[in-house]
Image: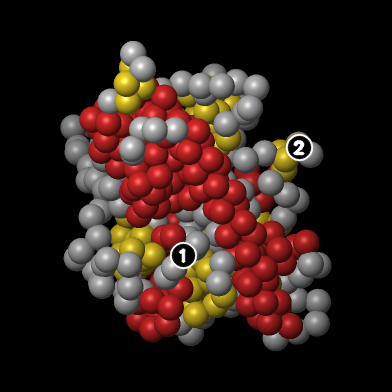
């Protein structure tokens, strides 16, 4: 996608900088657009843990490039140290346990490059392939989702604007390019569909108000930030036509792990008879997991994310401010699981399907 008119990916390996991977530092958005150079597995792991990169597809691609760096690090004194390579794989997989794309990409890199012979070159090719496939899958999600949004738009009175509610950030920043939940929005806007997006702020890290809103603004798409708990009221007032979110892991039965708060949006949508769509590449489906409720590991992040917020003050000076009662603690589950029965349909690079057909989307 474009930033100030220039096309970018979220993670890439520039040919003129051998031995390094570059990322967009999402922690510095929307106040500053900055890129960061990563030169080793430790730096890649830190970038994932600290959410300099985040989002299922972006994490997977970044981890793949991390395994390319691991292959380089495993060559010592003319010998491939497989134990170093596999240790790097374990380290990267432990950074974010909920998103399945991470382990999927790392395991794929181990199969391709784990033998050592020619592994560095094969690892580079495979990491590039994972990145390209992610971008292509998200572009296809946009094309398939366009049909959904166009159909809903055509059902509105002439001149009506299609109102989409989304949660967290499942745009191009969450993938290599294009995004999942926002890909149909981008495709619809490009096709001339009048669309407006309600953007959940998405506490506690504000991926909606910081990242989704920034993305939509860069693409010139109408949007409004709302508090996380405003969605049901907007639906009750007839101001929402559909909800569309991304996913971090989807079980074979269609249970969806996504940013905490997604389950509440699905419940409200069901109550008001609104469609609830989940958009994600097929690599997000965990083919080995039959059901997700009670089975998908839920990442518990630090309490400080809930108790404190950071950002620039009126003078532009970045500050960290406590927003909770002194002495109180906080729980911070990063994800929740939406039961498949609340999902209207999934949009993947292979088309639109209902939860019962999800297994057919697997490779």
In x, y percent, where is residue 126?
Answer: 49, 44
Residue 128 vs 191, above or below: the answer is above
In terms of depth relative to the viewer, which is nearer, 52 or 241?
A: 52
In x, y percent, where is residue 331?
Answer: 22, 46
Would you say 7 lies left or right of 32 here?
right
Q: Quadrant of the C terminus?
A: bottom left
Dot 1 or dot 2, earlier in sequence: 2
In terms of depth relative to the viewer, which is nearer, 124 or 103?
A: 124
Query: According to the image, label 1 marks what residue?
Result: 282
In terms of depth relative to the viewer, which is nearer, 215 or 134?
A: 134
Q: Quadrant of residue 293?
A: bottom left
Residue 225 vs 145, above or below: the answer is above
Q: Quadrant of residue 190?
A: bottom right
* Residue visible at 75% across and 76% down in the picture: 160
For residue 6, the mark is 2
Would you say 303 lies left or right of 111 here?
left
Confirm whether residue 51 shows in the render: no
- CA neighbours of label 2 inside 10 A, class few (<14), some (14 to 19), many (20+): few
In terms of depth relative to the viewer, which is nearer, 162 or 89?
A: 89
* Residue visible at 43% across and 78% down in the picture: 360
Q: CA distance from mark 1 to mark 2?
A: 29 Å
């Amino acid at each position: 996608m474009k930033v100030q008119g220039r096309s970018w990916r979220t993670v890439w390996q520039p040919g003129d900088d051998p031995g390094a991977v570059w990322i967009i530092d999402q922690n510095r958005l929307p106040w500053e657009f900055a890129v960061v150079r990563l030169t080793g597995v430790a730096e890649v792991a830190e970038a994932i843990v600290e959410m300099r990169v985040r989002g299922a597809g972006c994490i997977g691609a970044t981890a793949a490039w991390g395994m390319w760096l691991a292959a380089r690090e495993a060559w010592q004194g003319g010998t491939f140290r497989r134990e170093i390579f596999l240790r790097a794989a374990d380290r990267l997989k432990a950074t974010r346990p909920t998103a399945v794309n991470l382990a999927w990409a790392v395991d794929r890199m181990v199969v391709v490059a784990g033998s050592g012979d020619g592994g560095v070159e094969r690892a580079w090719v495979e990491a590039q392939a994972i990145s390209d496939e992610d971008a292509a899958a998200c572009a296809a999600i946009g094309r398939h989702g366009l049909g959904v949004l166009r159909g809903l738009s055509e059902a509105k009175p002439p001149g009506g604007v299609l109102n989409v509610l989304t949660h967290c950030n499942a745009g191009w920043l969450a993938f290599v390019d294009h995004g999942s939940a926002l890909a149909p929005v981008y495709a619809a806007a490009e096709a001339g569909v009048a669309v407006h997006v309600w953007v959940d702020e998405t506490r506690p890290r504000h991926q909606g108000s910081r990242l989704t809103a920034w993305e939509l603004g860069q693409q010139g798409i109408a949007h409004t930030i709302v508090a996380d708990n405003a969605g049901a009221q907007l639906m009750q007032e007839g101001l929402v036509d559909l909800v569309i979110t991304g996913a971090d892991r989807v079980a074979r039965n269609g249970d969806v792990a996504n940013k905490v708060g997604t389950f509440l949006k699905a419940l409200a949508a069901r109550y008001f008879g609104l469609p609830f769509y989940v958009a994600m590449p097929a690599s997000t489906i965990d083919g080995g997991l039959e059901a997700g409720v009670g089975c998908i590991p839920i990442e518990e992040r630090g309490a400080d994310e809930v108790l404190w917020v950071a950002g620039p003050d009126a003078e532009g000076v970045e500050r960290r401010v406590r927003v909770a009662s002194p002495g109180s603690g906080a729980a911070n589950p990063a994800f929740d699981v939406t039961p498949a029965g609340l999902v209207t349909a999934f949009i993947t690079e292979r088309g639109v399907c209902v939860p019962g057909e999800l297994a057919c989307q697997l490779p």
